Amino acid sequence: MGGDSAVVVKTRKFIRNPLLSRRQMIVDIIHPGRPNVPKKELQDVIAPMYKADPKLTFLFGFKTQFGGGRTTGFCLLYDSEEAAKKFEPKHRLIRNGMKEKKESSRKMIKETKNKGKTIRGTGRSIALHKAKRAAGAD
């Protein structure tokens, strides 16, 4: 672990969730003398504790206590990559590097939405399909 001082990682409320094929827990990090700890560093610490792959470790929802030195968050350890891709939201997959972010301008999204609103009836689905293809081509 890099940094000035040691980091203590404690877990509580550990639950094995077989329906979502994962283990989930609350993580308490004690880091005196440091503002906070990067999630990448925490992945490398927590995964070996539970004999899991750091790539399948999802950390989120961290709140640093007032005054610093202590942070609490949530951790999910998936059993397989398929389960992670099936159950995790897209934004967390992107953060973990398991999915690429689709770059699209805000203006383009709004134009397609408004174009879809003007057309009614049976031609609507065709027009929406054409608008999506046009957005994909750009």
Image (cartoon, rainbow, N blue to C red):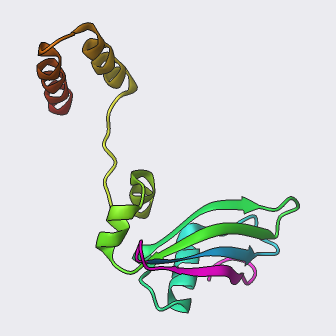
Q: Residue at x 72, y 75 (%)?
A: 28
Q: Quadrant of residue 7?
A: bottom right
> Which quadrant is home to the C terminus?
top left
Q: In this view, does 29 lie above or below 96?
A: below
Q: Is residue 51 left or right of residue 131?
A: right
Q: Is residue 73 left or right of residue 115?
A: right
Q: In this view, does 119 lie to the left or right of 29?
A: left
Q: Is residue 86 above or below residue 41?
A: above
Magenta region includes residue 12: yes
> Which quadrant is home to the N terminus?
bottom right
Q: In which quarter of the image is residue 39?
A: bottom right
Q: Please tell me which residue lies in front, 74 or 18.
A: 18
Whether residue 138 is visible: no
Q: Which residue is drawn at 39% across and 56% down?
A: 94
- Percent across and percent down for residue 47 are 50, 84
Magenta region includes residue 89: no
- Percent across and percent down for residue 128 are 19, 22
- Percent across and percent down for residue 86 are 33, 63
Q: How many labels does the image show?
A: 0
Residue farthest to the right, as pictured = 67
Q: Give the range drawn in magenta.
A: 1-21
Q: Quadrant of residue 79?
A: bottom left
- Percent across and percent down for residue 82 are 29, 71
